[in-house]
Amino acid sequence: MKRFHIHVGVKDLNNSIQFYSTLFGQQPSKVKSDYAKWMLEDPKVNFAISTRVNSEGIDHLGIQVEEAHELAEISERLKKADLGVYGEGETTCCYANSNKAWVKDPSGIAWEAYQTMADAEVFSKKVETAPQSCCPPKVSSTKSCC
């Protein structure tokens, strides 16, 4: 199963949590001092907000997968698009341990394809075996959430 992902930068986390909880009709599934996430079933979306981005608004989009073979399939499709896949590998990001691949579309919008393996206690850290950033790689853009 795949789930669409949207990460939005916000200025005031508490006001934003209140707004999105009202919009979605449910409370976030994860709340930290700088981050909140809703795992919505209808529509099937992983919607996250945080104060860790450089600006307000959409920071990046993505596709979350459950199985490693789904991530490999999406990564291969991204490579065929010939836009350059960046930041492949394991990382800790958004309070989760994940395996990711990043690409920027022709308009410069960062997209990630990722599989979440477990919750994490920290927003981000580099994994020794693959020191990629958790957020959109700095490839012809100054926008980054970490």
Image: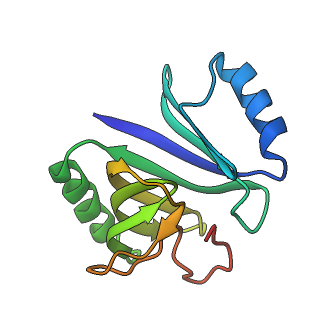
User: Would you identify the image quadrant in which residue 87 lies?
Assistant: bottom left
Q: Nearer the viewer, residue 37 or 111?
A: 37
Quadrant (top left, top right, bottom left, bottom right) of the C terminus: bottom right
Q: Nearer the viewer, residue 118 or 86?
A: 118
Residue at horizontal 49 percent and vertical 33 percent from the top: 45
> Where residue 120 sits: x, y (%)?
43, 54
Q: Is residue 121 left or right of residue 84?
A: right
Q: Is residue 138 above or below residue 110?
A: below
Quadrant (top left, top right, bottom left, bottom right) of the N terminus: top left
User: Would you identify the image quadrant in which residue 13 lies?
Assistant: top right
Residue at the outermost top position: 25
Q: Is residue 30 left or right of residue 141?
A: left
Residue at horizontal 46 percent and vertical 51 percent from the top: 62
Whether residue 132 is visible here, answered yes or no, is yes
Whether residue 134 is visible here, answered yes or no, is no
Residue at the outermost front position: 121
> Where residue 143 sits: x, y (%)?
67, 73
